[in-house]
Image (tube, coloured by chain):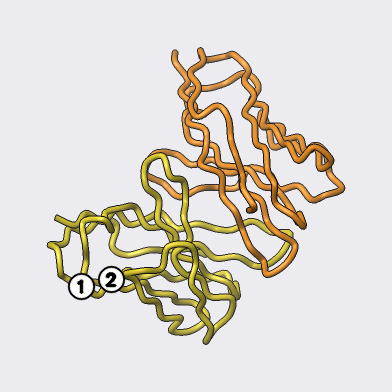
Chain colours: A yellow, B orange
Amino acid sequence: NAGVTQTPKFQVLKTGQSMTLQCAQDMNHNSMYWYRQDPGMGLRLIYYSASEGTTDKGEVPNGYNVSRLNKREFSLRLESAAPSQTSVYFCASWPGQGYEQYFGPGTRLTVT
Amino acid sequence: KNQVEQSPQSLIILEGKNCTLQCNYTVSPFSNLRWYKQDTGRGPVSLTIMTFSENTKSNGRYTATLDADTKQSSLHITASQLSDSASYICVVSENRDDKIIFGKGTRLHILP
């Protein structure tokens, strides 16, 4: 049981490049989330998926797209990276009300 | 607007001492409150989760309290250890739409 896994761990992009951050969970959770964490800002929700086949915008969705490929996998895509997207990205899954979220180890992204 | 405010922003204490971190929230309707520990470079890990009817919960040297009337929670750490150096994040869930609201965290430094 690996929990929540994320790839890659680190990435450096040039402005305008695109990339996809991968997330997978093996706990059979319905809900999955993408957050970004910046110094002094706390975790901010980018997109979430309450169940397979559904996605919804969070607090800071601009510049990102997501795909809930199946129940296990939830990917985050940057179509044209900008320096403002330099951040640490966390994926999380959640079994439902009354339970905790489970976080992945994070992806540290730098856009130059 | 639903908010979660944590204090202090950062705290430095000597190894072996106790400390208390605060969390005030305005989230309504309230579902549950969680405290997470986030080590540098890692994803957050849950310490405790409390519902409306619970006013204290312990996890080893960590004890969380909740006053749902005043909408305040605290996390008390007893006999601190160097490994307690981390950020501690208070997270509150709304009782509708499964909305989760994060505080910005308290950065705790334990000095030997």
The reply to whether the C-beta atoms of the residues labelled 2 and 1 are less than 8 Å apart is yes
The residue where tag 2 is placed is A78
> Given the image, on which type of amino acid does mark 2 rest?
Leu
Using a 10 Å C-alpha cutoff, classify the residue at mark 2 as few (fewer than 14 neighbours), some (14 to 19) or many (20 or more): some
Residue farthest to the bottom?
A53
Amino acid type, mark 1: Ser
Drawn side of residue A15 relative to residue B64, left or right: left
User: Which residue corresponds to the image point at 56% horizontal and 41% vertical from the top-left?
Assistant: B89
The image shows residue A12, relative to residue A20, as above or below, that is above
Q: Mark 1 = which residue?
A: A18
User: x%, y% of residue A14?
Assistant: 12, 62
Name of the residue lying farthest toward the right: B53
Q: Is mark 1 on a helix, strand or loop?
A: loop
**Nearer to us in this view, B2 or B30:** B2
- Residue B50: mark in rendering: none
Looking at the image, residue B67 lies above or below residue A49: above
Along the viewing direction, whichever of A97 and B26 lies nearer the viewer: B26
N-term mark: 2 or 1: 1
Question: Which of the chains bears the disc numbered 2?
Answer: A
- Give the letter of the chain under mark 1: A
Q: Is B69 above or below relative to B84?
A: below
